Amino acid sequence: MATVARRPFELLNIDALLDDEERAIQDTVRRFVDERIRPFIAEWFAAGHLPVADLAREMGGLGLLGMHLHGYGCAGTSAVAYGLACLELEAGDSGLRSLVSVQGSLAMYAIYRYGSEEQKQEWLPRMAAGTAIGCFGLTEPDAGSDPASMRTRARRDGTDWILDGTKMWITNGGVADVAVVWARTDDGIRGFLVPRGTPGFAVRDIEKKLSLRASVTSELSLDGVRLPQDAMLPGARSLAGPLSCLNEARFGIVFGALGAARDCLHTALDYASSREAFGRTLAGYQLTQRKVALMTANLSTGMLLALHLGRLKDRGSLDPAQISLGKLNNVRAALDIARECRTLLGANGIVLEYPVLRHANNLESVLTYEGTEEVHLLAVGQAVTGVSAFRG
Ligand code: TGC
Ligand code: FAD
């Protein structure tokens, strides 16, 4: 017997867990993605391109940049609303969500939380409007999971600072007006604002990526970069500074990855409902139903987890180990769903006409950045055993 098909999130009535403002923001972002991203994303991905400046202005106009921050032109929404926006953006492409994560949760948040009033006034309103782009340089060629071993150094020269080092895999690097660069000093790890064009500061975009192709990923070189004293973020001392920014971006990924997974699952369900094999649609076979039922369970429980973490964040009680659990679970779930959906599309699953393998490829990066799966396994392991297994 045929019944009316419900979309995976409709089955658990996830909408009932949202308030009117959250639903309105989600609808607005979904419309933006449908109109401004979906028609073009396959071409951008194929070309290894994202029109960052145009999209940033449009998303700034919608209030999506630094949207959960308050003042300085930021929208000041709830954490849940920010998460839902990430979900809808990543349903378009992880590269789009990355642009917004790095701008709002990493670069703007670093300035918002640790910057002087002058630094905030100089950068945040323009970054919220999307007329200035930021990037966040923590990772180095030889220091990714273990940023405490970074080599980039800042030394004093009179009242100035001189920075030397290399940052690697930096999202938005090649298009950034300002780079938040983390460096070792005699006073521990500190953050610096490095404007584009500063002598000695060079960027090189990383080409030939197989993942996150619709995203700018760059290497930043700092060779004797001279900065005034007021380029340093006064409030950030030690690795806790950058790591606290990562909490913000990881939170967005907990929601965002589910957007990519939802897009894959919707695509696969539509496909399975019309594609026939052996005399009936794929949707009618028990093996297909096993796949879609398990994916629906995986996606829905991921969403409940994301909303729970979002509510904790809005209450001010979300801690880093909880975010690690969310990123660990939801990115793995999303990647598994994307790969399983690929099987349902058969050969059609490998072409860019359908979004599933693009999402799956992107999710390989999402699994690695903002703390690899192993880093979050170890963080959750430490939280529940009380023993740190990070170092040998
Ligand atoms: P450890 O000794 O544990 O801690 C050093 C200091 O940091 C504090 N801390 C945290 N603070 C806030 N939030 C957290 N999540 C924190 N974790 C630790 C800690 O209390 C301590 O503070 P203090 O005051 O005593 O100095 O540090 P560790 O060296 O043992 O490393 C811990 C570890 C492995 C968890 C950390 O290094 C880590 O998270 N590694 C992963 C690195 C990472 O995620 N990199 C991401 C780079 S950015 C990026 O990928 C952007 S992609 C964006 C996109 O395109 O969407
Ligand atoms: P490594 O740290 O060398 O890890 C290699 C492998 O070893 C991984 O599987 C890892 O989990 C494992 N491993 C490491 N330590 C342990 C351990 N203790 N126990 C068990 N296994 C371990 N960084 C930024 O600073 N800013 C950005 O904007 C940014 N954007 C990025 C965009 C993209 C597309 C990508 C792919 C990366 C980006 N990154 C960025 C870098 C990203 O954060 C790092 O790649 C990530 O932190 C992992 O570092 P690594 O690549 O050096 O891998």
Image: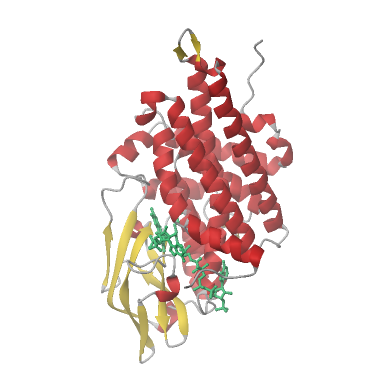
* Ligand 2 picture quarter: bottom left
Name the foreground residue: 118 vs 67.
67
Name the foreground residue: 288 vs 177.
288
Position of 354 compared to 244: left or right?
left
Name the foreground residue: 6 vs 80.
6
At a point 47% along the width and 59% down the height, the residue shown is 127
Position of 192 compared to 120: left or right?
left
Q: In the figure, 154 relative to 265: above or below? A: below
Position of 77 compared to 209: left or right?
right
Q: Residue furthest top?
A: 279
Report the colour scheme.
Answer: secondary structure
Q: In the figure, 234 relative to 180: above or below? A: below
Name the foreground residue: 147 vs 87.
147
Residue 313 point in image, percent of width and height: 67, 58
Residue 146 point in image, percent of width and height: 44, 69
At a point 45% along the width and 78% down the height, the residue shown is 232
Number of callouts: 0
Q: Is residue 236 visible?
A: yes
Q: Quadrant of the N terminus?
A: top right
Residue 252 point in image, percent of width and height: 56, 52
Q: Is residue 62 visible?
A: no
The quadrant in which residue 295 appears is top right
Position of 114 compared to 300: left or right?
left
Residue 308 point in image, percent of width and height: 69, 50
At a point 40% along the width and 77% down the height, the residue shown is 183
Q: In the figure, 19 relative to 103: above or below? A: above
Q: Residue furthest bottom?
A: 158
